[in-house]
Each structure stands twice: as structure tokens, then as C-alpha cells.
Amino acid sequence: MDVIKQLLKDKLSLCALLVLVVIYTALLFADFLAPYSKDYSDRNMSYAPPSKIFTIDETGHLRRPYTYNYKREFIPEQMQVNYSLDRSQKYPVKFFVRGEKYKFLGLIPCDRHLFGTDGQIFLLGTDINGRDVFSRLLFGGRISMTIGFLALFVLFPIGLLYGGISGYFGGKVDMIMMRFAEAVMSIPSFYLLIILAAILPSNMTSIQRFILIVVILALIGWAGFARVVRGMVLSIKTQDYIEAARSIGASKMRIIIKHILPQTTSYIIVAMTLSVPSYILSESGLSFLGLGIQQPDASWGNMLKEAQEYFNILYRPWLLTPGFLIFVAVLAFNIVGDTVRDILDPKSKG
């Protein structure tokens, strides 16, 4: 509780926490917030620009928000598609409207959406397949922002126990265990992922494919974490309360799990907050390269892939939105992690 209080006192970390809370809340209620489902597609609206929301009509009077549909026109001379507003009919923006059916929080059947119109509304435009970018950002963020925690559930228990045993027993046991950990650390994970992408069954879903890759990454990444835990255990095991536990007959595993590893909590908390951003970037990078989440499933990484074309960057900047969200999320996690480290280890401030 003291850590939380000090964290909330820091204005920068408080802003970062609020950003993360907003992001994860939006992802949790994605089905309700998104005007379209993740499978919605209208090929006639390929690369449609963001919808314009109007609050003042042609006479200059204030009105409830409304929008117009887009008209698609092909210009032969320029060999490109042009979108213009169809001002023949206005479509008021409605709230809590009925739309495509979904399960609220994955449990409750529902068809209410936060907003919508009787026409078209694309807050952040559409992609090449006419899919609403705003809706896909919400659904894709669920993968990009939660996949890192899955890796932590694999990485941290293994690294903690392995490093604790190695540091406590020392001697030959420590030497053998650390040499094995160094061998694991020497495996080039990037090339391993490329090999895996080539040999994995083609009938695997993109979710299954990426979960398998993340688990393998975690099985490689535990070694570096275990080395740090081992160094901490070497200093902790000489403390008086450890000697007292030995003198009353406590088993070695009980001493490691009950008395030594809990003393590494501060490092674990910091390591977790700083590890999540690396997995967010890993997912985004792999999906960007085509090794992670595959279309038509959405993730911020494979959505950003579409923005790598020079023409799209210049004329369709809304496709860069996933990259901006990745930047904001990673920055927020790093700010929180740095602040927690400073609170738990004041010496790190220098």
C-alpha cells in the first residue's frame, strides 16, 4: 500500500497509470465501444477516410452531432479512388444503439453499442478491406496488450525457482545450473522464431501460433531473470533469519520458497512492469513481419504493417494509429516501472 501511495503522488507516473487504465478499460469493453464487429467488412469502402462529425448545420445553427455517408468515385485520369461526402442525407449520431450481436464481457448476450448511425461512421477510417480501423484497434489491442502477461506466467515461476535453487546450493550445483542458463541465453531467439514460423502447421489459428511462439520465447527468456535472482539469493542466504530457519530444521526447499524468494519481491515487481513492454514490442514486431497474428485477426502489429507503404503514410495517416498506441502503451509501462524501481530501491536514483 505504501508503494501504491507513493506511486500515486508522482504526477508523471499517475498520468501513465491513468493512460493504462483507460486503455485496458477500453479493451475490456471493446464489443460495446466498437460500432462494428471485428469481422465487419465493406469492400466498397476500401481506404475510406475518417468520418466527419458535424455539430453546426449549413445555416450556422448548433445541432446534435451528425455525419454524412461517403460517395466513392474512380478518377481514370489519375488512376485513383476519391471519396466525397454525400450531402443528400444527414445521419444523426446515436448513443446506445442496437447493432451486431455480441457477448458482453464474453458472457451476456447483447446487441447495444455505445454509438452508431443509420448510415456509416468510421472514426479512424478504414483499411484496404473496408474494415473499420477504430473497431479493429479495440479488438487487436486485446492481443497486443495482454500477450505479455501470458509470457510472464511462464517466465517468472521458472526463473524464480531456478535462480533460487542455484544461488542457495552454490558450489557445483550452481556452476552446472548457471552454465545451462548461459547456454539457453545464447540461443538467438529471432532466428529461432523464423524457423518456427516455417515449421509450424499451416492449419494452426493465428492465436494458437502466437501463443506457442510466446511460450517458447518465455522458455528462453527465463535464463536472464534466473541469473539476477541467483545473485540476490547469494546475498540473502547469509542473513541471520536464514540461519535460524536452518537451526530449527526447516527443509531446504521451504527455506528457498518461504524465506528467500519473498525477499526478491521488489525486483520481481519492477521486472514485471519493465518486461511487459518488451513483449508488446515483440508481438508488434513479429506480426509486422508476418510471423505473429495473421489476417483476418487483428493486432496492432499486423495493422501497422499496412502503413509501411510510402503512399499510405502520406495520404492515409490514420493507418499509423496502431503505432502511436504502441508508443503510448510502452512509454506508460516504462514510466510506471521506473517509478516503482525508484520507490523500492532508492539507491537506484543515484
Image (cartoon, rainbow, N blue to C red):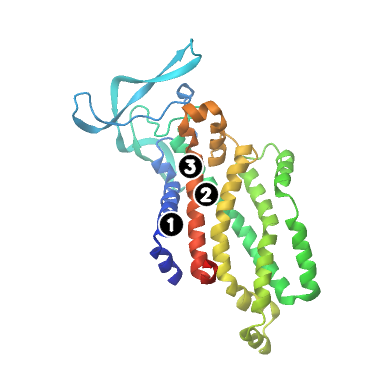
In-image side of 68 versus 343 (left or right)? left
Depicted 131 relative to depicted 281: above or below? above
Residue at 63 percent across and 86 percent down: it is: 240
Residue type beneath disc 3 = Phe
Which residue is outermost to the top? 77
Q: Secondary structure at mark 3?
A: helix
Q: Residues within 10 Å of mark 2 (few under 14, many from 20)?
A: many
Which residue corresponds to mark 1? 17
Which residue is outermost to the front? 350
Residue at 23 percent across and 26 percent down: it is: 57
Q: Residues within 10 Å of mark 3 (few under 14, many from 20)?
A: few
Task: Say which of marks 2 and 3 sits in front.
Answer: 3
Tell me the CA gap for discs 2 and 3: 14 Å
Residue at 46 percent across and 12 percent down: it is: 75
Residue type beneath disc 2 = Met
Which residue corresponds to mark 2? 145
Indicate the position of residue 292 as horizontal and vertical percent values: 62, 41
